[in-house]
Image: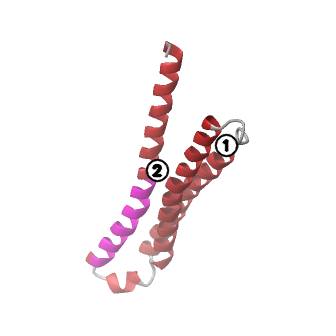
Amino acid sequence: MDFSEEQALETYKSMISIGTEAMEGLQLINGGAVVALLAYIGQAKDGAKLATRIDTPVAWFLAGLVAATLTFVLTYLTQFRLLNELRRPAEVKQGTHIIWLFITIGFAVLSILFFSIGSYAAVCALKG
C-alpha cells in the first residue's frame, strides 16, 4: 500500500470515528434533555403544575432521540451497501450507497431540528 492509499484509508477511518461521535452526541443531547427536564420538574416547587406543560418538549426530545438512533441503523445500511459495491462491482449498481448516505444525514439533521424545537418548547413551557 503506497502513501496515498494509506492516507485515504486512515482518513476514512477517522471520518467513521467522527461520525460515530456525532451520532452519540445527538443521542446524548436529546436523551439528556429529557432527563434534565424531568429532574427539574421533580425538584421545582410547582412541579405538579409544570409537569402538565412539558409533554410537548419531551415529545420533541424523544423524536430527536429516535431520529438519532435511526442514524446508527442507516449508517450501517450505508456501509453495508458500500461494502457490497466494493466487493461485487459487477453485480451491484455503483454509487447507490450515496442515497443511503443522504437519508442518514437527513435523519441527523432532523435530530438536531427536533432538539432545537424541543428546547424552545421547554423554555416556553417553563417560563409560563
Residue interval drawn in magenta: 25-42
Neighbours of disc 2 within 10 Å: few (<14), some (14-19), many (20+)? some
Q: Disc 2 vs disc 1: Cβ atoms closer than 8 Å?
A: no
Measured as percent of width and height from the top left, residue 76 is found at 53, 50
Residue 23 is a magenta residue: no
Which residue lies at the image location 73% right of the left edge and 41% below the top edge? 93
Q: Name the image quarter holding residue 29.
A: bottom left
Question: Residue 40 vs residue 65: left or right?
Answer: left
Instruction: Give me the C-alpha separation between circle 2 and circle 1.
Output: 18 Å
Q: Which residue is mark 2?
A: 23
Q: Amino acid at mark 2?
A: Met
As rendered, which of 71 and 64 lies closer to the eye? 71
Q: Secondary structure at mark 2?
A: helix
Residue 11, image x, y percentages: 49, 27
Side of 123 where 87 appears, left or right: right
Residue labelled with disc 1: 98
Tell me the residue at 41%/51% (across/down).
Answer: 24
Q: Which circle's residue, 2 or 1, is located before the other in the chain?
A: 2
Examine the image and state in which quarter residue 39 appears: bottom left
